[in-house]
Amino acid sequence: MKKPLILVTNDDGITAPGLRALIKAMNELGDVIVVAPDSPQSGMGHAITIDSTLYSKKVVIDHQEGAPLEYSCSGTPADCVKLALQEILDRKPDICVSGINHGSNSSINVIYSGTMSAAIEAGIEGIPAIGFSLCDYSWEANFEPTLDSVKRIVSQALMHGIPKGTVLNVNFPKLDQKPNGIKICRQARANWREQFEKRTSPTGKDYYWLSGEFELLDKGQDTDEWALSQGYVSVVPTQFDLTAHHAIPQINNWSLNES
């Protein structure tokens, strides 16, 4: 049987340790092709490059025998997936995996995530897709405890498929040992209490530095934030159909077409 073709990407850049860990895990499951940004693209969301040139080149980072083909891209994570599907790959991948991100993409963070946007771009094209993140922002983060769960989740997705219109958002707690298990969750209700710190440059120009605190508004024990706090891997099925279907009947009662 032909091995599954696995497209690997991320938002932290092609040299990021989290990506290297994900490649290591995927090499055990199939034929891997890597297309990733040539520099960090965190927080880019689903941005795409439309007003400047886009570059891509084959790179060699892993010199071991049997290392996968890798391409760096000057664009965003979503650009990487578009370019991979349209220009680089000679067949449709069986799955796209994005990450492993340095930092959490749980709860409201998924909205801003370049990691998840790469996976969503693949999902839009009908490709099963998963975004992986570790709740540790350090470049020296320990990804080893995540790898067994990564392989298990991807293997099950390849075996059973992922529901149409759905992309999995997987987050790992920061641990020095294997997690307690895997929980299927809903996205916790939360937001960022943000503020801009105003500073002045040496040339006298004002500039701003964004900071803030994460505010959890959800006490449910079925959320990703609860699972992570208890040492579990959280798996949230997300969808890219943003229609609030439950709101349609209420808004249909508005007087929108009366003179």
Image: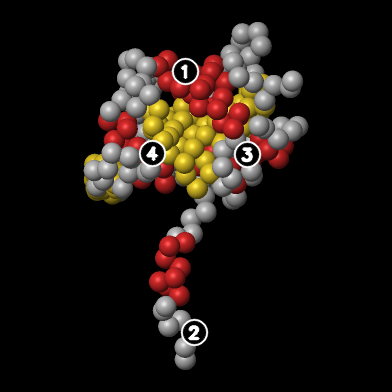
Q: Position of residue 222 (x, y in %)?
A: 32, 40
- Provide the residue designation for mark 2: 257
Q: Secondary structure at mark 2?
A: loop
- Provide the residue designation for mark 1: 148
Q: Does residue 98 appear in this view?
A: yes
Q: Are marks 1 and 2 in contact (CB under 8 Å)?
A: no
Q: Secondary structure at mark 3?
A: loop
Query: Label 1 amino acid?
Result: Asp
- Provide the residue designation for mark 3: 127
Q: Earlier in the sequence, mark 1 or mark 2?
A: 1
On screen, 54 above or below 206? above
Q: Within 10 Å of the Cα at label 3, are there few (<14), some (14-19), or many (20+) other Cα atoms?
A: many
Q: Earlier in the sequence, mark 1 or mark 4?
A: 1
Q: Residue furthest bottom?
A: 259
Q: Secondary structure at mark 4?
A: loop
Check the picture and name the quadrant holding the N terminus. Answer: top right
Checking the image for residue 185, the label placed there is 4
Q: Position of residue 98 (x, y in %)?
A: 52, 32
In-front residue for pair 116/46: 116
Taking the spot 45% from the left edge, 75% from the top edge, the residue there is 252
Taking the spot 34% from the left edge, 27% from the top edge, the residue there is 232
Taking the spot 68% from the left edge, 38% from the top edge, the residue there is 85
Q: Earlier in the sequence, mark 1 or mark 3?
A: 3
Query: Label 3 amino acid?
Result: Ile
Kindly report the distance in space between the C-alpha atoms of the residues bearing marks 1 and 3: 23 Å
Q: Position of residue 230 (x, y in %)?
A: 28, 28
Front of the two marks 4 and 3: 4
Q: Quadrant of residue 184?
A: top left
Q: Give left or right: position of 222 versus 130.
A: left
